[in-house]
Amino acid sequence: MEPIPKSGYYYANKMALIAFKALEEVMGKNGLNAILNLAHLNHLIGNLPPDNLRREFDFADMSAFNLALEEMYGPRGGRGLALRVGRAAFADSLRNFGALAGAGDLAFKVLPLSAKMKIGIPAMAKIFSQISDQYTTVQERETDFVYTIHRCPVCWGRSGSDKPVCFIAVGLLQEGLKWVSGGNEFRVNESQCMAMGHEVCEFIIQKTPIG
């Protein structure tokens, strides 16, 4: 695969570290190293990003990591791994962070589900603005929420895809919604993707939990 040109936009080191650790858990060290090699990130082999919130991990490198998953495991296998990485990234780092820390409090737990989502989804968007150069907006509609990433690290610099590719972001959202709602699973579909030529990456979150 061709290298993706650097973006000049950054993710917190900790988020990248957690994504790599999550992949290593599933695939082992050799599997992770093979992905890093394919993604032109071999400088990270044995030298993963530090565990801090400094914005130093380029969006292009996150996008290359995501593309390497697809190339090595095919669209279907890559999607499963990307979802898993996204879910782990949320579960391991974000749920006690900033605006979401209160979601574990009793006062939040007794709110109706609609109120939890109304508070929780914008809180998730806000966290990414705090720990990265990702810019996200949230719009509520009658049956769903529209979660729009205007600068997306997961597909940065990609084009020509015939389908959405931001499954790391879908996994993050799914796990975040589970945490905010107190254990429910929600349907999250990426309806627009910059890798397909759209201007934004847009995710539709259904208000009604699955099952």
Image (cartoon, rainbow, N blue to C red):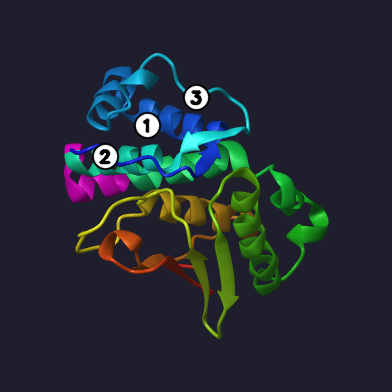
Q: Does the magenta-highlighted stretch encompass residue 32?
A: no
The residue lying at 48 percent from left, 34 percent from top is: 57
Is the residue 157 above or below the residue 39 in the image?
below
Q: Amino acid at mark 2?
A: Leu
The residue lying at 38 percent from left, 48 percent from top is: 83
Can see residue 182? no
Q: Which residue lies under the disc numbered 1?
A: 23
Q: Which mark is residue 69?
A: 2
Q: Which mark is residue 49?
A: 3
| Image location (x, y in percent) of residue 124 | 62, 56
Q: Earlier in the sequence, mark 1 or mark 3?
A: 1
Q: Where is the C terminus found, in terms of image quarters?
A: bottom left
Q: Count residues near mark 2 (Cα–Cα under 10 Å), then give few for <14, some for 14-19, many for 20+.
A: many
Query: CB atoms at circles 2 and 1 under 8 Å apart?
Result: yes
Query: CB atoms at circles 3 and 2 under 8 Å apart?
Result: no
| Image location (x, y in percent) of residue 122 | 64, 64
The residue lying at 60 percent from left, 58 percent from top is: 125
Q: Answer left or right for 177 relative to 114.
A: left
| Image location (x, y in percent) of residue 28 | 32, 22
Q: Which mark's residue is nearer the viewer, 3 or 2?
A: 3
Q: Amino acid at mark 1?
A: Leu
Q: Earlier in the sequence, mark 3 or mark 2?
A: 3
Q: Where is the N terminus found, in terms of image quarters?
A: top left
The residue lying at 29 percent from left, 21 percent from top is: 33
